[in-house]
Amino acid sequence: MSIVGASEQTRERLLTAAREVFSECGFQGATVREICRRAGANVAAVSYHFGSKDGLLAEALHFESLRLLQEANACAAACPEVRLGLFIRDFMHMLLDENNASSQCRIMARELADPSPGLDKIVREAIAPLHDFLARLVREIVGDKVGDAELRRCAYSILGQCSFYHHSHPVLQRLHPELRYDSKEIEAIAKHIADFSLHGLKYLGKTA
Amino acid sequence: MSIVGASEQTRERLLTAAREVFSECGFQGATVREICRRAGANVAAVSYHFGSKDGLLAEALHFESLRLLQEANACAAACPEVRLGLFIRDFMHMLLDENNASSQCRIMARELADPSPGLDKIVREAIAPLHDFLARLVREIVGDKVGDAELRRCAYSILGQCSFYHHSHPVLQRLHPELRYDSKEIEAIAKHIADFSLHGLKYLGKTA
DNA sequence: GAGCGTATCAAACACTTGTTTGAAAGTAAA
DNA sequence: TTTACTTTCAAACAAGTGTTTGATACGCTC
């Protein structure tokens, strides 16, 4: 590489570009050429460094920030209700904040709608732990009187609300062009989801 | 067309096949050749009858069943709380029941994650009316003390829970291979979402 | 400098995509 | 039958896909 400023390892630049493009276009929509263009690398670089487009995706995936979020939450000295609110807030920032470096969640969300060879790894390393974490947190709130199936559905209710704002973004923007996911809006959304869900959880089983 | 049993108009067979394939693979993932193969038609048929793949999608979209569902619900002689439960139940059947002929919702859900030229029509003719309908229903339940932004978020909370089961299906199936969306399971899910949401709505604003 | 393994490159490859073409077949009124 | 029009078809087209190739440059040890 003779271009000045391109001293960074090609491999790393490819990974960064790949995360960008995969999160924007999905696995199928992303092209090796576009990734290489953004990385300032030759088309052959992907094959050379990662074997294939599949291999690039596999290496581009890592879920550190998601794991850290859960760890920090589990260690927080607060009642489970408050911790649920904190989790939702952090999770929504991760999902919606464009300044947030974590494009991982966006790739993840993409994969849901359009499973690719990468989905298995994502499920194993990110989604399964996330579901488990949330199920434990919900269990602390609702107690033991709720069955496992119903507990799972409670976790799904929370995750469903959170991911809605992410994956419906193209639609919501068409319906309300003035909508912006700035920090204030994200906080308001997170607070709504937390309140809505806590009431849903707390009074669950009281009517049946 | 000389093949026996292929007497049905090519145009109609193309539309049927298109709805199938679009709902399975999304707009980008669907190929004209696969659609024509299932319709027993020549590749050129799409261009001839619909001008292009885009045109085929536009004609393949119609949201009769979704509109009827809303109309029937609005006419039902029941309190808004019960009508919300009925709506969620019908909507979940439409989303999850594989026997249900309405592949429209599946196409719709696909489009969210991967917007195509068809999304504008979908938003205008299906999603916007759906959001309005649900907002009116929620308004009946929560009364006038809740602002418009918060009201919208309530509708999103409900829609988010519903669509979660649909668009996370590939993940949930990997996590719980025994999961089947049979009629009993769909009813249980719908009941959970209705209970969870009603409590979320009813007690909204009581803690703040 | 010679030799060697790594990295990069332009170019090509094999394949799939949506679309077009021009001929053939069918249909129905004149 | 002739005529005009619609529909279907195999084949081809142009563009885009992931991947491979063989040459070239680089950085290093000897």
Image: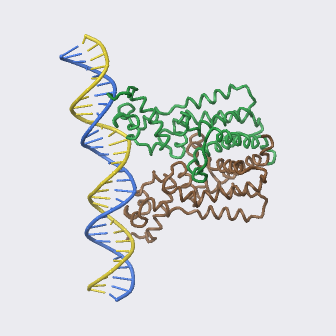
Chain colours: A green, B brown, C blue, D yellow
State the quadrant of the N terminus of chain A: top left
Give residue A65's position: percent from left, percent from top: 57, 30
Q: Is residue C1 left or right of residue C29?
A: left
For residue A58, side relative to residue A174 (left or right): left
* Residue B136, quarter of the rendered image: bottom right
Does A200 sit above or below residue B15?
Answer: above
Q: Residue at x 72, y 63 (%)?
A: B74
Residue B85: horizontal and vertical position, in percent?
A: 73, 55
The reply to whether residue A116 is in sight is yes
Q: Is residue B88 above or below residue B10?
A: above
Query: Of residues B162 and B175, which is closer to you in this image?
Result: B162
Q: Residue drawn at (75%, 30%), measured in percent from left and top? A: A79
- Residue B178 visible in this rendered orientation of the protein: no
- Percent position (x, y) of residue B181? 62, 50
Q: Front-most of B125 and B59?
A: B125
Give the left or right position of residue C4, taking residue A5 as reference: left
Query: Residue A162 at x, y = what percent?
Result: 64, 42
Q: Nearer the viewer, residue A6 or B156?
A: A6
- Which residue is at a point 69% across and 33% down the rendered structure image? A86
Q: Quadrant of residue B65?
A: bottom right
- The structure residue drawn at horizontal position 73% and vertical position 57%, both measured from the top left corner, is B137
Above or below, B161 against A187 in this view is below
> Disc count in the image?
0
- Residue A148 location, quadrant: top right
